[in-house]
Amino acid sequence: MTSLQGLFVPMITPFTADGALAPAALEQHAHSVLDAGATGLVALGTTAEPSALTTDERDRVLDLCAAVCAERNAPLIVCAGGNATAESVRAVGELRHPIAGVLAVVPYYVRPSEEGVVAHFTALAAASPAPLYVYDVPYRTARPLGGETLVRLANIPNIAGFKHSVGGVDAASVELMARAGSSTTVLCGDDRFASALLALGARGGILAAANIAPADYAELIAAWLAGDAIRGREIGNRLDALGAALFAEPNPTVVKAVLAQRGQIPSPAVRLPLLPASPASTAAALRAADAAAAAPV
């Protein structure tokens, strides 16, 4: 099973000022983050607002991301599945684009037992046409997983690794890395804790803030993968204020506001129930981005 490593940018979905999909802006943004050093893209993750897209829009977004990755020979990770196992198996099994990985979230809202989570991912892994990555994000799912469960998931055939987004580095994180870090791929999903998890042996990241500073986050990951802890700490510390500012309001509202202010997408529009980022949060994030870019390298 091929392991993925490096920076994977979870694509935003640009909208026009009147709320329509802006496909040309998405294509341009995808190329720009790859130009800046990203390893690959993530399509239809949380940052893409997939639940607010129509079926046709989701298909269009996936087609565009897949076309860019094919043109650039870059790996594509696709998010699929939800909190119902049978429907998730169907959705994952129907993926047809050439993809390097499938990212599937821990079942949310229904709060299954950890045994139920293991059974869910066993079924998904068997149906997946590409290596499966478990998206562990208890902040959104209300289903935290213990270290023992994470290690069990890592040993299921066709489960290649994790997007680990637990809001910090906890005991389960340490146990996962200690017991399975050499045999599974952990991609950090919490922007502010990326450096800490990379220090423990994570192999990369899926980081929303990299929509704003892809070169910096690519450099952060490259430093840790090269074993340059001093450089990794320096970059991680420099980027912390940016990561905090971009998540001051629900993702991806501030990210899109900054991109729009920079003229990289047509508008900061998001879809309800999300509301556009406030002027104060946008201004703070722009200042943080400018400060991170201006810091000594």
Image: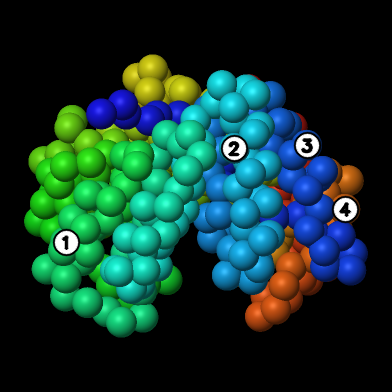
Which one is in front in this view, the residue at disc 1 or the one at disc 4? 1
User: Residue 66: which disc?
Assistant: 2
**Residue at left offset 64%, top offset 28%:** 34
Q: Amino acid at mark 2?
A: Ala
Q: Is residue 287 visible?
A: no
Percent position (x, y) of residue 166?
35, 60
Local packing at callout 1 (Cα closer than 10 Å; few below 14, some 14-19, many 20+) is: some
Q: Amino acid at mark 4?
A: Pro
Q: Earlier in the sequence, mark 2 or mark 4?
A: 2
3D distance between C-alphas at marks 1 and 4: 42 Å
* Quarter assignment of residue 80: bottom left
3D distance between C-alphas at marks 1 and 3: 39 Å
Helix, strand or loop at label 4? It is loop
Left or right side of 259 for 108: left
Q: Which residue is mark 4?
A: 266
3D distance between C-alphas at marks 2 and 1: 29 Å
Which one is in front in this view, the residue at disc 3 or the one at disc 2? 2
